Amino acid sequence: MSGSRRLRKALVMCVDQTFAPFAIFLASQINRLCPARDFDICLVSDAQLVVPPAFDGLHLRLIGPVQDPAYLALENRELPRSTYLRLWMPHLLNQDYDRLIYLDADMFAEGGDWSALFEVDLQGHALAAVRDVQQWREPERKVFEFEATRRGSRPYFNSGLMVIDPAIFVARDVRDRCLALGNAQPELAVHHDQSLLNLAVDGAWAELSPVWNWQWPLKHPMFTDWAAPNLIHFIGHLKPWNDKRGLYPQRFRHAYSSFMSQHFAGFPVITVPETSLLRSGPRTLRMVVQFLARRAALLRYLDRFPDPLATARSDLRSQEGP
């Protein structure tokens, strides 16, 4: 481990060296949004990360390389193994911090009171998060993982952002129950560790406003501008830096292109596609029609959170969590 612990809360990303530039980009954004930052920023990895000296001012804390045999035994052909480090992260940092915010590195920060986000009411649960986009318009929609285990309807969160009480997370054996589920029924992990986390927590988590994990920047850009999210999540395989069709607004691509060319000389050049959504009549018309058709349902969802730092109860049962 490098760096020194200074504070009792930390923002954490789990990455390998390939994704480290994106994590540093996001850390730089959040650091600019928080001129009086009162939390550490940690990068957890199974490799010895190399951070350019230009970012010494971020005071990043590097955790790793993580060499737990149970972690090293994991296999995943679709995602880097480091994705699963978020299951280990609360255990690694439990003694150092009272609250953690976990973030995926494929996110773009545009605002928000990040210091206050650490203090949201977890309602006695191990974590708070934002619903996965598949339940935004249909909150009672049944997801595969709960259907396959005959649990019926449950709120299902996207694990790209989680506010975590590490002591509760560890005490309730969330990680070990995830691993046991994955070993016993690997077919349930359709969304990898996100599936396992939702099954382990089983609907007992505090729900955050979607402005903290906005998963609609590509499919519904009009909603994105209208809702003014604090954190935009580029879900799926298509990201602004590999978008060859011009589906993402150019401001994302320009921001990454400028950052990578300045600080990471070996990073592949991010090109600007010749086409864009703005120049595509049929796609633009379809976007407008979808906006009008889905506006009422999305308003109902957004109106549940008049305060972006309020949490709603997401567990469907009376118990306080597993």
Image: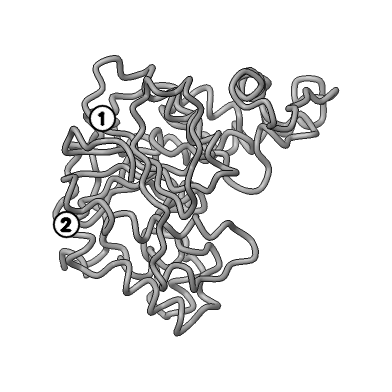
Q: In the rendered structure, which amino acid carries the disc numbered 1?
A: Asp
Instruction: Give the colour scheme shown.
Output: one colour
Q: Secondary structure at mark 2?
A: helix
Which residue is tagged 1? 307
Which residue is tagged 2? 167
Question: Relative to the observer, which residue lies in front, 298 or 12?
Answer: 12
Give how far across and how far down residue 212 sits, in percent: 38, 35
Give how far across and how far down residue 168 sits, in percent: 17, 59
| Quadrant assignment for the C terminus | bottom left
Q: Is residue 314 visible?
A: no
Question: Relative to the observer, which residue lies in front, 29 or 296?
Answer: 29
Name the N-terminal-most of marks 1 and 2: 2
Give how far across and how far down residue 164 sits, in percent: 26, 49
> As drawn, is 106 to the left or to the right of 64?
right
Q: Are marks 1 and 2 in contact (CB under 8 Å)?
A: no
Would you place residue 274 above or below residue 10 in this image?
above
- Residue at x 16%, y 45% (from the top left corner): 98
Would you place residue 168 above or below residue 261 in this image?
below
> As drawn, is 271 to the left or to the right of 186?
right
Q: In the rendered structure, which amino acid carries the disc numbered 2?
A: Ala
Would you place residue 68 above or below residue 96 in this image?
below
Q: Is residue 304 visible?
A: yes
- Residue at x 34%, y 47% (from the top left corner): 162
Give how far across and how far down residue 189 sits, in percent: 51, 70
- Residue at x 22%, y 63% (from the top left corner): 170
Furthest-bottom residue in view?
A: 184
> As drawn, is 155 to the left or to the right of 277?
left
Would you place residue 312 above or below residue 88 in this image?
above
Q: CA distance from mark 1 to mark 2?
A: 27 Å
Q: How busy is the neighbourhood of tag 1: few (under 14 within 10 Å), some, or many (20 plus)?
A: few
